[in-house]
Image (tube, rainbow, N blue to C red):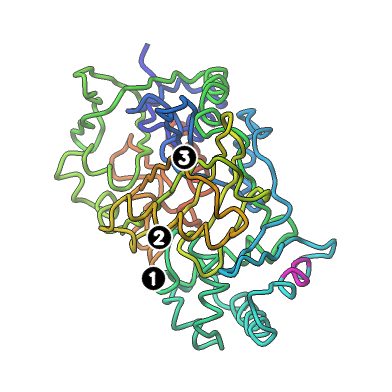
Amino acid sequence: MKADVIVIGGGLAGLAAALRLGQAGKRVVVLESRQRLGGRAGSFVDAVTGQMIDACQHVSMGCCLALAEFCRDAGIHEYLEPQRALYFMSPDGRVSPFKADPWPAPFHLGRALLGAHYLTATEKIRIVYGMACLVLADADDDPPLLPWLLKHKQTRRTIDRFWGVVLTSALNETVDRVGRKYARKVFVDGFLKTRDGFTVEVPTVPLGKLYGEELSNALTRSGATIRENAGVRRIHIEADRVTHLELRDGTRLEAETYLVAVPFDRLADLLPPEIAAREPFSFAAKLQPSPITSVHLWYDRPLTSLPHVVFVDCLGQWLFNRGETAPGEHYAQVVVSAARPLKGIGKDETQARIAAELRTLFPKTAAAKLLRAKVVTEHTATFSAVPDVDAFRPGPRTPIGNLILAGDWTATGWPATMEGAVRSGNAAAAAVLLENSS
């Protein structure tokens, strides 16, 4: 029986679309080229221990409402653990907890900012002023952020020790490259609008499990069929309609509607060249990628008792403490967002720099023995949120009548996040249902 909808791509965008379409009674087939679901939010098997390790730690926030709803509907919300306090560490090893008081937003984080040891009193006043100006700024205007910050009383030190710490992690891009629109969204939605918006939620299980068997079961219950190791070679189009898909193994598949939920750098490979050159498909080629590097380290003892650490003015941005994952092995992951400075120095040098930084930050455990390490870089982890990037982010509808687009790089109103991916999947599913009803 021919499917109603074929979803190309088993990342969060495709999975969210498949779940919504299945709930609406559509016969859905999800095609994933790899042997797992989750897309970039995936895991690999450690060759030494056989443990499932996340390629890069993905976290959610309290402001990510669409992602939270998706996790509840899929039955995986219980695997997300809220971090009620964030722990910020400066290069001297001192730590300031950042947590909310029982006051209404935006005053709930006032005492947390006042207690930040790595900022002077004058710098905190500057930051409050800059934040107020950001709130009052036009939400849709997207000039370069750095000149705007400097114009609004920010210094290089407040940028390095506050604005950059938050934004590089949230947007996977440096302050000198981003536009104001999504910087504003990070602070307004994440820190100022609601009390729980800033709360980080960390998976308690590897992403391979989070987006593995239980999510597959939820999709199956909704009526979807999951096909892994089913990469698409080409989408065949005639007279502005998709006629069929050609898989890499030569299989031909047909459906009423085709929903393409692949990363922006993969789209052109699937389309006929003359179609890929047309708008809005050509927009994907105009997006700039930004890399993320994760350094996985196994020590003979724990580095810290904290569940995570946010580094201030350091090479790494986050450390996630995953505890004792095997007898005598304590696993930590350090994430370096916007990792362009690491390009060309090699994995061994990257590992050495991160290990040296950790010895400085945690001097009491300087004698800890590094048992082994692994460096993983996703070179096109996200699109870069440069000024006016939304000009190259298409909506779900396309000139090809039965072809719909999804992905965190499409027009979601969010930066490249899991929340944006789920929102794009929801929008794509709504576009399919609207198309089918007309």
Residue 428, can we see it?
yes
Looking at marks 1 and 2 on the same chain, the residue that comes earlier in the sequence is marked by: 1
Looking at marks 1 and 3 on the same chain, the residue that comes earlier in the sequence is marked by: 1
Which element carries disc 3, helix, strand or loop?
strand
Query: Disc 3 versus disc 2: distance between alpha carbons?
Result: 27 Å
Looking at marks 3 and 2 on the same chain, the residue that comes earlier in the sequence is marked by: 2
Q: Which residue is mark 1?
A: 177
Query: Disc 1 versus disc 3: distance between alpha carbons?
Result: 37 Å
Which span of residues is magenta-colored?
Answer: 108-112
Q: Which residue is mark 3?
A: 371
Residue farthest front in this picture: 367
Q: In the rendered view, would you say 80 is above or below 236? A: below
- CB under 8 Å between discs 1 and 2: yes
Q: Which residue is mark 2?
A: 338
Which quarter of the image is occupied by the N terminus? Answer: top left
Residue 154 pos. (x, y %): 55, 84
Mark count: 3
State which mark lies toward you, 1 or 2: 2
Residue farthest right in this picture: 102
Q: Nearer the viewer, residue 257 or 53?
A: 53
Magenta stretch, overall SS: helix
